[in-house]
Amino acid sequence: MRVRPYGHEATIIDQLAHGTAASLRDTVLDACKSAGLRCIEVVTAATSLVVTHEARDSEAIRRVLASVTDRGSVVTRTTGPLVEIAVRYDGDDLDDVARACALTVEQVITLHSEAEYEVSFCGFAPGFAYLSGLPGELHLPRRSSPRTRVPAGSVAIAATYSAVYPRESPGGWHLLGTTTANLWDVSRDQPALLQPGMRVRFVRVMR
C-alpha cells in the first residue's frame, strides 16, 4: 500500500488488498478527526481509497494517512450494520448461471442467499453498491453481450461481486432475481441504502 498526492486537494491510498478499503475508511476519518483535520470526503474503490481535503491541509493529512498505514490499521476489520434485502429468485439468467457453474438452480440460490456480503465500494450509478463475499462457486465473468435495459431492483452477480441495480440501466451482470428494496431515494437523509462497510444478506422470498 502507498500514500500519494491525487491532485492538489486529494490524497490516495492505493495498492490495498481487496475488501480492506471500506474498513479503512472509518479508521481514516477517526485519525483525521483526532488530528484536528477536516476530510471533505472519503471515497472507497476496489483496491484504493481517496481522501479529498483543503489544499492547505495536504501535507498534514498525508502524514496522518502514512501513520495509519504504517501502524497496519489497514487490516483492522470493523463490523458494519447489517441490511437484509428480500429477493425473489426469478432472474432471467438463473438457469444459465446454474449451467455455467455446474450447479442446480437451487444450489445457486442457496449459495447466494446464505452468504454474507460487505459493501466494498459504490459506483456505476447512484446507489449501486459492489458487494464482496460472493461464494467462489458463483464467480463468473460478465455477460459477453450486455443488455441495453436491466430493470430496477435486479439482483445480479459478476466476477467476484453481487449487486442490486438501483434503477433501470444498461448492464452486463448475470440476473439472479428481483427485489422491491429502494436502493436510492433522494427524499431520505442518506439517499443510498447501502454504504461502504455495511453488511448485506439476501433473504429469499417465494413467488
Image (cartoon, rainbow, N blue to C red):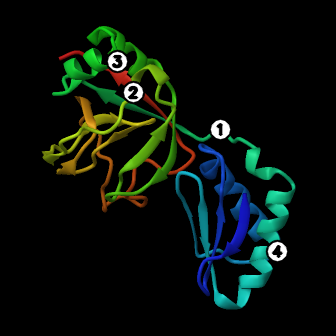
| Mark 3 surroundings within 10 Å by alpha-carbon count, few (fewer than 14), some (14 through 19), many (20 or more) | some
| Closer mark to the observer between disc 4 and disc 1 | 4
Residue with the mark numbered 1: 79
What numbered label is drawn on residue 202?
2
For marks 4 and 2, give the CA distance: 40 Å
| Mark 1 surroundings within 10 Å by alpha-carbon count, few (fewer than 14), some (14 through 19), many (20 or more) | few
- Place residue 96 in its image quadrant: top left
N-term-proximal mark, 2 vs 3? 3
- Where is residue 135? Give x, y as percent: 48, 23
- Where is residue 86? Give x, y as percent: 32, 28
Q: Residue at horizontal 31%, vertical 62%? A: 186
Please state which of residues 57 and 146 is positioned toward the viewer in this rendering.
Answer: 146
What numbered label is drawn on residue 63?
4
N-term-proximal mark, 2 vs 1? 1
N-term-proximal mark, 4 vs 1? 4
Circles 4 and 2, Cβ within 8 Å, touching? The answer is: no
| Closer mark to the observer between disc 2 and disc 3 | 3
For badge 4, the amino acid type reads Arg
| Mark 2 surroundings within 10 Å by alpha-carbon count, few (fewer than 14), some (14 through 19), many (20 or more) | many
For marks 1 and 3, give the CA distance: 31 Å
| Mark 4 surroundings within 10 Å by alpha-carbon count, few (fewer than 14), some (14 through 19), many (20 or more) | few
Residue with the mark numbered 3: 101
For badge 1, the amino acid type reads Thr
Please state which of residues 195 and 185 is positioned toward the viewer in this rendering.
Answer: 195
* Residue 143 is at least partly visible in this image: yes
